[in-house]
Image (spheres, rainbow, N blue to C red):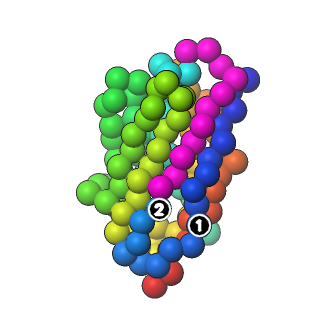
């Protein structure tokens, strides 16, 4: 069973930065999985933020392009989300997800709060 553990959330002022990390364990060939970040703000549905293929190909939702960067360290089975120029509307619980062809495994989430 694949386990995902997020870290790095917190409270930051608008314009600040945070770096989220997600360590994966418990499965084989995790380094070949697609990995990504989703978020869910209060009263809203969970939304895709960014994803990265094992080869390094990345995708972002439009609202974070130019501000967020997703990366991964396959040797450590870890995915990162560098978040810069944070805005109050980025406030949400951020979830790490992974899977072979789709996001089958999910972490518990980490809270990111951006104050204005």
Residue 63 among those drawn in magenta: no
Q: Horizontal placement of 98 versus 62: left or right?
A: right
Q: Visible in this render: residue 82?
A: yes
Q: Secondary structure at mark 1?
A: strand
Q: Horizontal placement of 52 versus 46: left or right?
A: left
Q: Position of residue 52 (x, y in %)?
A: 40, 34
Q: How would you classify the magenta stretch by its main secondary structure?
A: strand
Q: Which mark is residue 106?
A: none
Residue at the spot 65% in from the left edge and 19% down from the top edge: 27
Say which of 113 and 59 sits in front: 113
Q: Circle 2 is placed at which residue position? A: 18
Going by the picture, which residue comes out furthest to the right?
1
What is the CA distance from the residue labelled 2 to the residue labelled 1? 8 Å
Residue at the spot 55% in from the left edge and 15% down from the top edge: 29
Magenta part of the chain: 19-29
Q: Which mark is residue 10?
A: 1
Looking at the image, residue 70 lies above or below residue 55: below
């Amino acid at each position: 069973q694949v386990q995902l553990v997020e870290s790095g959330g917190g409270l930051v002022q608008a314009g600040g930065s945070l770096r989220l990390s997600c360590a994966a364990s418990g499965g084989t060939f995790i380094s070949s999985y697609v990995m990504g970040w989703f978020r869910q703000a209060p009263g809203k549905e969970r939304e895709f933020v960014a994803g990265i293929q094992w080869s390094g190909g990345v995708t972002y939702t439009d609202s974070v392009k130019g501000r967020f960067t997703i990366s991964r360290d396959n040797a450590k089975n870890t995915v990162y989300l560098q978040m810069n120029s944070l805005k109050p509307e980025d406030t949400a619980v951020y979830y790490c997800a992974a899977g072979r062809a789709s996001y089958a495994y999910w972490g518990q989430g980490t809270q990111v709060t951006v104050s204005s």
